[in-house]
Image (tube, rainbow, N blue to C red):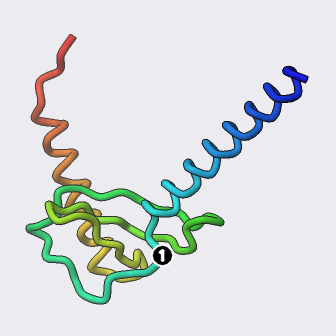
Amino acid sequence: TSSQKMGQIIFFVTFISDCLFYVSVYVECCRRYMKTRVPFGVIRGYSVQRETELCPINAIIFHTKRGKACTDPAFNWVMEYVNRLRNAAQLVHKTSKVQK
């Protein structure tokens, strides 16, 4: 019947969209760390990745002009870079004019 076909179509579309979502998350996440230190001057920002079922490691992801650099938060230099970026952001915040 047409209602069964409609139900099958809805199920199929939902299934495909869920699959595409999980594939995009999997592609974006870090699955291993860089082996070399990233020069601080090339870093534009960072994000934090927490270990999940799809992303198997905790990571600090430094964003550069060339892409992303997946780094191990256990390294002191990684957390020093994060602190430097936070301090720079706080300085920008403090010196910015408040807009109403």
In the picture as drawn, the residue positioned furthest to the bottom comes out as 35
- Mark 1 lies on a secondary structure that is loop
Q: Residue 44: give x, y in percent of width and height.
A: 17, 57
**Of 64 and 98, the residue lying toward us:** 64
Who's the residue at 10% across and 35% down the image? 95
Q: Quadrant of the C terminus?
A: top left
**Of 16 and 24, the residue lying toward us:** 16
Who's the residue at 32% across and 81% down the image? 76
Who's the residue at 56% across and 48% down the image? 21
In the rendered structure, the answer to whether residue 83 lies left or right of residue 42 reads: right
Q: Is residue 52 above or below residue 39?
A: above
Q: Which class describes the residues within 10 Å of circle 1: few (<14), some (14-19), or many (20+)? A: some
For the residue marked with disc 1, what is the amino acid?
Arg
In the picture as drawn, the residue positioned furthest to the top comes out as 100
Quadrant of the image occupied by residue 8: top right
**Of 41 and 23, the residue lying toward us:** 23
In the rendered structure, the answer to whether residue 52 lies left or right of residue 76 reads: right
Q: Is residue 40 above or below residue 14?
A: below
Who's the residue at 39% across and 81% down the image? 33
| Total marks placed | 1
Q: Residue 42: give x, y in percent of width and height.
A: 11, 67
Quadrant of the image occupied by residue 32: bottom left
Q: Residue 73: give x, y in percent of width and height.
A: 41, 75
Q: Which residue is mark 1?
A: 31
Q: Residue 87: give x, y in percent of width and height.
A: 21, 54
Q: Is residue 87 above or below residue 61?
A: above
In the picture as drawn, the residue positioned furthest to the front comes out as 1
Q: Quadrant of the N terminus?
A: top right
